[in-house]
Image: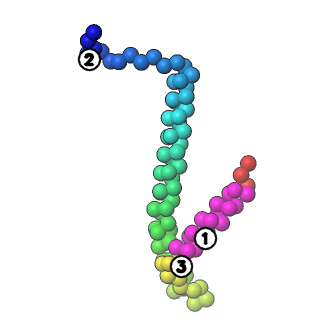
Amino acid sequence: MSYDYSKPPTVTTSRDRARLLSEEQRRQAQGAAVAAACVFMIAVIPLQALVLMLVMGAAHGAFAAVPAIGYGTSIMFILGADLVIGFIRRLFRK
């Protein structure tokens, strides 16, 4: 008995198996989307910190009462703000 390579293989799957496969694919797609969102949020932190540092520097130039902050301090402010926002979102989640 020889195999005919010109025809696609025929694989029969039940509807339940096909539904499980589609649910698994959907779960994997959702996981990939969450991972991409996390990578994006982490990649944006330095840009947010730079903008915060520049805004605080401009406010320090205009008003002497506003302290000038450095890049490291602005990163810590951004991380703290992200943590507080995440905590508040969890409090009001349905």
Position of residue 70 measured from the top left corner of the image (x, y, whole percent): 49, 82
Residue 6 seen: yes
Up-down relation of residue 89 to residue 60 (above or below): above
| Residue for badge 1 | 80
Task: Tell me where the magenta segment starts and ends, as one range.
Answer: 75-91
**The one of 46 and 1 positioned closer to us in this rendering:** 1
Marks 1 and 2 sit apart, C-alpha to C-alpha, by 61 Å
Q: What amino acid type should be assigned to the residue bearing mark 3?
A: Thr
Position of residue 71 measured from the top left corner of the image (x, y, whole percent): 48, 78
Q: Is residue 22 magenta?
A: no
Up-down relation of residue 25 to residue 9 (above or below): below
Do labels 2 and 3 touch, CB within 8 Å? no
Please name the residue shown 50% across and 40% down the image: 28
Circle 1 — which element? Answer: helix
Magenta part, dominant SS: helix
Q: What amino acid type should be assigned to the residue bearing mark 2?
A: Tyr
Position of residue 38 measured from the top left corner of the image (x, y, whole percent): 51, 55
Please name the residue shown 50% across and 35% down the image: 25
Up-down relation of residue 66 to residue 91 (above or below): below
| Residue for badge 2 | 5
| Residue for badge 3 | 73
Residue 55 seen: no
**The one of 52 and 81 positioned closer to us in this rendering:** 81
Marks 1 and 3 sit apart, C-alpha to C-alpha, by 10 Å
**The one of 11 and 44 positioned closer to us in this rendering:** 11
Crowd band around label 3 with a 10 angstrom C-alpha radius: few (<14), some (14–19), many (20+): some
Occupied quadrant, residue 80? bottom right
Q: What amino acid type should be assigned to the residue bearing mark 1?
A: Gly
Q: Is residue 88 magenta?
A: yes
Occupied quadrant, residue 60? bottom right
